[in-house]
């Protein structure tokens, strides 16, 4: 019985559910796509010759990336289903009250809302699976074109991935709708009799607890984990903003009205602003539902963009702080290496030997790139120095690790680590030093130069060169440029700037992959809720017209309201972004004297503009139509 | 129609004897502006198979009285008994069950579910109670309110008077013992209003229903057996068998 009612509700009020449907459908599509690709890649990996380590590493990276992208989109999908469903419940308080009045028990109402989510979930899963399946060949081809996937991966059969994706899609719909369903069950029958919707800004104990716990947890993670490396910072930047967003949305009905008051503090002389403010403050839950997708995407995208930029700053700071060599040659061939070494006016020519080494851990072998270095040369040219232990000891069977690896792998100074070289030799290496991370300058695993040479180490294409005393770097660059066949010599500053640009370009690509789909959902959800918000308020608009507002004034009112909602959400999003960014930056810059501060204003500004424009347009578009159709004259006659 | 359980039969039997008894009920709303005493001690028995109109100036507590009597609102103090059952002792689910088995509601704004056709709106209370009503049951009730032909229309395709008649059909379909109506003719023109009133009157006369109706209109009140007057949350009069003119006179005295 309730399921049939759910079906009809969805059919009739489909506009209320369109946002959930699209967000969920895209989420399932993305998930189906990812799972199909992961499935295919895995099947393909099994057929790859284990000696092709590069290919295997690339496949591993690809799977990890697909995992992050789909996990992230999953969160946004749950979030958007939750907020659009709670909006849909809130918008139908009278209708739900009426159901209660004619005899529905709270449980039946809850089942009805869950039934609605089931209907939306099933429809969205079917559509999403079809879309994901259709897109998978194209995406695989695109990944290949981008150099992210190998050529010949055959597509696996889509059935299991589709089952998994739709299972997750339906559960996401259910989970997202649960809170809304519980709230719907609390609607009292008298709600049906109230002409004026009324809300209280109070929130339940559980909601308050969850909100506070999320915020406290987020801050503890940011402050407590002394994230000294950009990889961990990246992980935190991915997940902490989500916790903050959940916390803020839980506390929204308390917080957001106050913020609306604050933002309109000096503007109450304007009658439209005052009216907009009162409308928003009187309906704290509704306002929260409208604000939450904007808050989510601005906080999450903002934090990620800022944190990645700060991580790049950190890389840059570390590189500049450590790099001693005034001249760097990149893209050098082995012949170029000889040329550099044999020059008379070169004091230090430092070059690492790269070698693939498998590290044995709990019976498994992890492939890693080791760099064979001469500790004295590396110290003179790249400023490589030990944080713990002694780099001088990097001779014989020994190795050194970067601080982030020590943290990540749990390898400690003095450990003996079983390794296997590409030539099949096995041995145990003693960890003699832990060095500061410097991703641009050296690998995260170091071993003696001679050891690398003995086991097939290939010279890296980068040389760090210090001219002999009395020789100017500029002259050396000019002279090298003439002699080198493949390599390019340049002043260290320029090389650092190039690395910085590379890092930021890579970041842009990952940001695009991670944020692209979620931003799309968010935009759809924002447009949908605001559109619905305006359609729902038909009577109110007409009443406002009746008391003498011009059509133009009503439209302005709608735009001001939407703008205020967006502004409040953006303020909270900005606070989150600044908090996450600065708390992650603090431990990273510790101990470095000169870290640049790069704030990606352009990206951040485009988020702000999109978050303001989309809601305002979405809110005013239906208002125009509604106002045309319902002139006050018609309203007056009923 | 679903089979009534033993329990329900008991309630029915007792409801016929003493449908709705209000015993010294008060209702105080507290809002930011201070306390509002909507009801200040109302004691009244709505006799079985009677049609009672409730009148009084705006804000005198008529709607509050109705809502307390129907268990939609809980009184601050005092007791409400419906069919011998004390409403204070019932849980939310218990109240819902009691309401759907023994009460029907009609309000000024028609309160139909926009997603459902007239037929499905009328069938809804029975479905919610777990019964699978036959088409003919619903058609009969719709025919009684003169809408047999329009059963497939949605509320948005019906006039105000037609919507009101659908909501009366919905109130009657579960064969309640009491129908509560709050200004059911408030939004209707004179002749449509009269149809609705005659419909309520005939249910009392032919089926022994009890009707409690809030109204501002003396003519509407004259369809009732007795008129209960409220002022400032208290009962200030009870006219039995009065005509429209007498009721109007009484009202204007109150409003002076
Ligand atoms: N939810 C509420 N909160 C605070 N005060 C309320 C609330 N509902 C009603 N009141 C107050 O209680 C009093 C009685 O209200 P009630 O709705 O019962 O009046 P009424 O007799 O039905 O009036 P009308 O004829 O205008 O419908 C009024 O003063 C009203 O302001
Ligand atoms: Mg009233």
Image (cartoon, coloured by chain):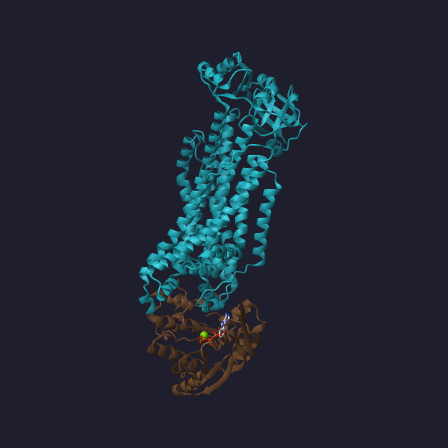
Chain colours: A cyan, B brown
Choose between A530 and A103: the one closer to the eye.
A530
Dividing the picture into quarters, in which one does residue A274 lie?
A: bottom left
* Whether residue A369 can be seen here: yes
Q: Give the tally of numbered discs.
A: 0
Position of residue B39 in the picture relative to residue A25 (left or right): right
Q: Position of residue A521 (x, y in %)?
A: 43, 46
Above or below, A255 against B1 in this view is above
For image coordinates 51% across by 44% down, the residue present is: A577
Is A570 located above or below residue B25 in the figure?
above
Q: Residue at x 52, y 29 (%)?
A: A57
Q: Where is A552 relative to A390, above or below?
A: below
Q: Please tell me which residue lies in front, A552 or A299.
A: A552
Q: Position of residue A127 (x, y in %)?
A: 41, 47
Q: Measured from the top left, where is residue B87 in percent x and y?
A: 56, 73
The quarter of the rendered structure image containing the C terminus of chain A is bottom left
Answer yes or no: is residue A29 visible.
no
Relative to B245, A100 lies left or right? right
Residue under the point 44% across and 75% down:
B182
| Residue A547 x %, y % | 36, 66
């Amino acid at each position: 019985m309730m399921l049939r009612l759910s079906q009809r509700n969805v059919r009739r009020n489909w506009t209320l559910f369109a946002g959930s449907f699209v967000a969920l459908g895209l989420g399932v599509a993305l998930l189906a796509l990812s799972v199909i690709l992961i499935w295919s890649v895995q099947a393909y990996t099994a057929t790859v010759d284990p000696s092709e380590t590069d290919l295997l590493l690339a496949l591993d990276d690809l799977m990890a990336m697909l995992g992050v992208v789909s996990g992230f989109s999953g969160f946004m999908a749950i979030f958007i289903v939750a907020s659009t469903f709670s909006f849909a419940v809130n918008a139908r308080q009278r209708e739900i009250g009426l159901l209660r009045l004619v005899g529905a028990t709270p449980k039946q109402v809850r089942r009805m809302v869950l039934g609605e989510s089931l209907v939306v979930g099933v429809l969205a899963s079917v559509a999403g699976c079809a879309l994901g399946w259709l897109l998978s060949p194209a995406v695989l081809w695109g990944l290949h074109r981008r150099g992210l996937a190998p050529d010949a991966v055959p597509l696996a059969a889509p059935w299991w991935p589709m089952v998994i994706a739709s299972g997750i899609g339906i559960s996401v719909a259910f989970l997202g709708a649960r809170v809304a369903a519980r709230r719907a069950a609390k609607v009292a029958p008298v709600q049906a009799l109230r002409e004026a919707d009324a809300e209280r800004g109070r929130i339940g104990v559980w909601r308050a607890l969850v909100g506070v716990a999320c915020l406290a947890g987020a801050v503890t993670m940011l402050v407590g984990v002394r994230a000294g490396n950009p990889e961990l910072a990246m992980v935190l930047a991915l997940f902490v903003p989500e916790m903050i967003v959940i916390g803020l949305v839980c506390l929204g009905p308390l917080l957001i009205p106050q913020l609306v008051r604050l933002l309109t503090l000096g503007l109450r002389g304007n009658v439209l602003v005052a009216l907009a403010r009162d409308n928003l403050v009187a309906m704290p839950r509704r306002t929260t539902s409208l604000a939450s997708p904007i808050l989510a995407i601005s906080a999450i995208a903002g934090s990620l963009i800022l944190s990645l930029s700060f991580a790049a700053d950190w890389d840059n700071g570390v590189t500049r702080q450590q790099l001693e060599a005034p001249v760097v040659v990149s893209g050098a061939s082995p012949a170029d290496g000889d040329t550099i070494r044999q020059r008379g006016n070169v004091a230090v020519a430092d070059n690492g030997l790269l070698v693939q080494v498998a590290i044995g851990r709990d019976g498994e072998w992890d492939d890693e790139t080791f760099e064979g270095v001469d500790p004295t040369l590396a110290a003179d040219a790249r400023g490589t120095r030990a944080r713990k232990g002694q780099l001088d000891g990097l001779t014989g069977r020994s190795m050194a690790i970067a601080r982030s690896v020590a943290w990540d792998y749990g390898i400690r100074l003095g450990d003996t680590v079983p390794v296997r070289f590409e030539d099949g030799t096995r041995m145990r290496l003693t960890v003699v030093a832990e060095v500061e991370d410097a991703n641009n300058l050296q690998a995260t695993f170091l071993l003696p130069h001679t050891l690398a040479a003995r086991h097939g180490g290939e010279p890296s294409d980068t040389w760090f060169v210090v001219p002999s005393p009395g020789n100017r770097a500029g002259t050396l660059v000019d002279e090298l440029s003439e002699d080198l066949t493949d390599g390019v010599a340049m002043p260290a500053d320029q090389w650092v700037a190039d690395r910085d640009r590379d890092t930021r370009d890579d970041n842009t690509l990952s940001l695009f992959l991670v944020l692209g789909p979620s931003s799309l959902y968010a935009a759809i959800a924002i447009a949908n809720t605001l559109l619905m918000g305006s359609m729902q308020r038909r009577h109110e608009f007409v009443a406002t017209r009746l008391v003498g507002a011009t059509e133009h004034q009503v439209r302005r009112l709608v735009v001001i309201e939407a703008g205020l909602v967006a502004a409040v959400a953006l303020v909270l999003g900005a606070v989150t972004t600044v908090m996450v960014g600065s708390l992650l930056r603090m431990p990273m810059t510790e101990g470095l004297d000169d870290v640049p501060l790069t704030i990606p204003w352009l990206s951040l500004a485009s988020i702000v503009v999109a978050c303001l424009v989309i809601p305002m347009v979405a809110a005013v578009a239906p208002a125009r139509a509604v106002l045309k159709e319902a002139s006050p004259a018609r309203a007056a006659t009923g | 129609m679903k089979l009534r359980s033993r329990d329900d039969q008991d309630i029915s039997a007792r409801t016929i004897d003493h449908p709705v008894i209000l015993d010294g009920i008060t209702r105080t709303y507290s809002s930011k502006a201070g306390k509002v005493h909507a009801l200040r001690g109302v004691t009244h028995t709505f006799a079985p198979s009677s049609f009672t109109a409730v009148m009084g100036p705006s804000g005198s507590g008529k709607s509050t009285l109705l809502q307390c009597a129907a268990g939609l609102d809980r009184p601050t103090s005092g007791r409400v008994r419906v069919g011998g059952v004390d409403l204070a002792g019932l849980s939310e689910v218990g109240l819902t069950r009691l309401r759907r088995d023994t009460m029907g509601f009609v309000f000024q704004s028609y309160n139909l579910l926009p997603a459902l056709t007239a037929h499905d709106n009328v069938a809804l209370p029975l479905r919610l109670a777990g019964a699978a009503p036959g088409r003919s049951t619903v058609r009969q009730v719709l025919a009684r309110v003169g809408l047999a032909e329009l059963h497939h229309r949605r509320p948005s395709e019906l006039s105000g008077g037609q919507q009101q008649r659908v909501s009366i059909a919905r109130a009657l379909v579960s064969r309640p013992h009491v129908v509560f109506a709050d200004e059911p003719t408030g939004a209707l023109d004179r002749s449509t209003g009269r149809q609705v009133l005659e419909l309520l009157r005939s249910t009392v006369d032919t089926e022994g229903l009890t009707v409690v109706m809030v109204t501002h209109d003396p003519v509407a009140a004259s369809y009732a057996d007795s008129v209960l007057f409220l002022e400032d949350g208290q009962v200030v009069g009870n006219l039995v068998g009065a005509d429209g003119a007498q009721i109007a006179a009484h009202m204007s005295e109150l409003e002076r």
